[in-house]
Image (cartoon, rainbow, N blue to C red):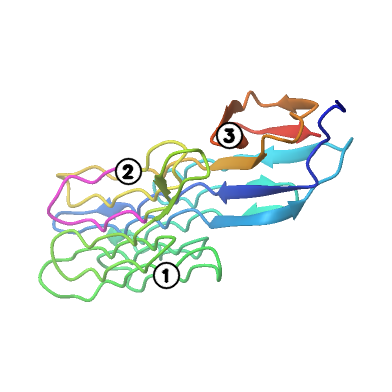
Amino acid sequence: ASAPVAPSAVEYLVVAGGGGCGAAAGAGYGGGGGGAGGYLSASGFAVSTGSPLTVTIGNGGAVATAGGNSVFSSITATGGGRGGGAGGNTTPASTGGSGGGGGGTSGAGAAGTSGQGNAGGTYTGAFAQYGGGGGGASSVGAPGASGNAAGGTGTATSISGSSVTYAKGGDGGGAGVPIAGASNTGNGGGGGWSTVFADTAGGSGIVIIRYADSFAAAASTTGSPTITVAGGYRVYQWTGSGSITF
């Protein structure tokens, strides 16, 4: 029998790093939630043999900082926007894969990138000074009206072999303990509130590709991807930057 040939096309998931929440300075104020990292997924991406394809994993944004871009070959997912500041910090939310939520005093949520994510929620001035939720891959962030404004929802995919949800926006700062973006999820950081709950950072991104296991394994990889063969697919999953050559 002839040896398997390399694939001519692959399916990919590229998720950028989530943005950090907005810094909350002063009692009674909540920072905006960080925007989720951009989410891009498609099948039929053409590949050829002999040339390495670059993989870059975007970092999660620190507090008041946008997330880093993630890259697979020519595909670039944009890092999530930072949340807006609150109280004595009036730094506005920034745009990104998904936009950051507006802080308790900095106002408007920021826009997301078309095809990658959604806008963050705006502080409305109702009740106390609550931050808006960061945008997520599947929905906009909730307005900062009361309590913890929910971040936009993420998107579930089974490209790795089991269903995982990526790129959720960070909740706006309010009455509950904020949740930082977990590593390699692209989630935005949840907003802190007052001097009670600390501000949080966004989660780093991830790159996953797969193709039918009837095709040959890659000739080489760098960046120590997790490689699995199951369910009829070869799956390569990077949590750190590297490359793949067919």
| Contact, mark 2 vs mark 1 (Cβ under 8 Å) | no
Q: Earlier in the sequence, mark 2 or mark 3?
A: 2
Q: Is residue 140 left or right of residue 216?
A: left
Residue 219 drawn above or below residue 233? above
Counting residues from the start of the chain, the first of labels 3 and 1 encountered is 1
Q: How many marks?
A: 3
Of badges 2 and 3, the one in the foreground is 3
Three-letter code, disc 2: Thr
The residue sitting at 15% across, 54% down in the picture is 27
Q: At label 1, which amino acid type do we have?
A: Ala
Residue 173 shown in magenta: yes
Q: Are marks 2 and 3 in contact (CB under 8 Å)?
A: no
Quarter occupied by residue 57: top right
> Mark 3 — residue?
237
In screen coordinates, is 160 left or right of 90?
right
The residue type indicated by label 3 comes to Gln
Query: Which image quarter holds the N terminus?
Result: top right
Q: Residues within 10 Å of mark 1 (few under 14, many from 20)?
A: many
Q: Is residue 69 visible?
A: no
Q: CA distance from mark 2 to mark 1?
A: 19 Å
Residue 119 numbered tag: 1
In the image, residue 245 lies at what x, y percent? 80, 33
Please report the bounds of the magenta region as a residue range: 169-179
The residue where tag 2 is placed is 200
Let me know if residue 177 appears in the view: yes
Classify 5 as above or below 101. above
At 28% from the left edge and 65% from the top edge, which residue is drawn? 132
Q: Earlier in the sequence, mark 2 or mark 1?
A: 1
The answer to which of 167 and 209 lies nearer the viewer is: 209
Where disc 3 sits, the SS reads strand
Other-residue count near label 2 (Cα within 10 Å), few / some / many at <14 / 14–19 / ≥20: many
User: 93 and 185: which one is in front?
Assistant: 185
